[in-house]
Amino acid sequence: MDHAISPESPSLSRRQLLNFLTGTAVATTVGAVLYPAAQFLVPPLEVSEGGGILAKDKNGTPITARQLLAEPSGTRALIAGLAGEPTYLTIQDNGVLAPMGIVDNCTHLGCTFPWNPAEQQFQCPCHGSRYTPEGVVVRGPANLPLKIVHVAIQDDAIWLYPWTELDPRTGELPWWV
């Protein structure tokens, strides 16, 4: 048995070893710099498996349930909802959020409108449509109820989910599905 190394085929030359070590050092440094940059550029997970999204304020910052529930009961908070649609969330008399949010788009021409606390109605300033606190048409020209969404709280985060089952106000399939 001959254990001598043949001089004709060296396994790794000095130049190859230095190239390997330099490449490894460069790749490690570049990876250490690019990983945090990539983490910064990738938005955090704000969409759930069921198609829900986090409720956000006008600046796109997620709103916590604690933040909304600090307001008095009967308060209607306007937030950015599904697909960025303005949505009203209501604080009920028992101090919890209503399980149904009302999308702030008039079903006549899509105008946004304010909540009128004096008359307890949503009133569209464009053409005069009026809606009950639940979003049912009181006066036209709008002839469809306002779109609604599910509201759920999980770990102090407010999640909004599309409403796809029967509309509790009409007992029919929603017009927006």
Image (spheres, rainbow, N blue to C red):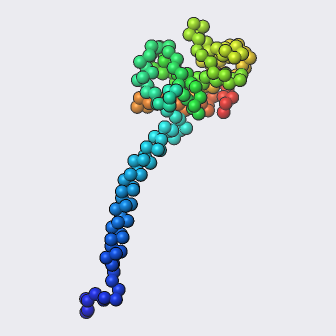
| Point 74% across, 17% down: residue | 141
- Examine the rendered structure and indicate whether residue 100 appears above or below residue 43: above
109 on left or right of 97: right
| Residue 38 image point, x, y percent | 44, 48
Q: Residue furthest bottom?
A: 1
Image spot of residue 157 (x, y percent): 44, 30
Picture coordinates of residue 104, whole percent (x, y): 61, 22
Say which quadrant the N terminus sits in: bottom left
Residue at the top extreme? 118
Q: Residue at x 35, y 74 (%)?
A: 16
Residue 1 is left or right of residue 43, and the answer is left
For the C terminus, give its image quadrant: top right
Q: Is residue 11 above or below residue 143?
A: below
Q: How many marks?
A: 0
Q: Position of residue 51 (x, y in %)?
A: 55, 38
Q: Is residue 66 visible in the rendered structure shown here?
A: yes
- In the foreground, 127 or 59: 59
Instruction: State the residue at coordinates (52%, 26%).
Output: 58
Left or right of residue 98: residue 16:
left
Q: Residue at x 64, y 14 (%)?
A: 123
**Residue 8 higher or lower than 119, as above or below:** below
Going by the image, does 70 lie left or right of 48?
A: left
When asked about the image quadrant of residue 86, the answer is: top right
Quarter residue 133 falls in: top right
Instruction: Say which of 166 and 110 sits in front.
Output: 110
Q: Of 61 and 170, which appears nearest the observer?
A: 61
Determine if residue 152 is in view. Answer: no
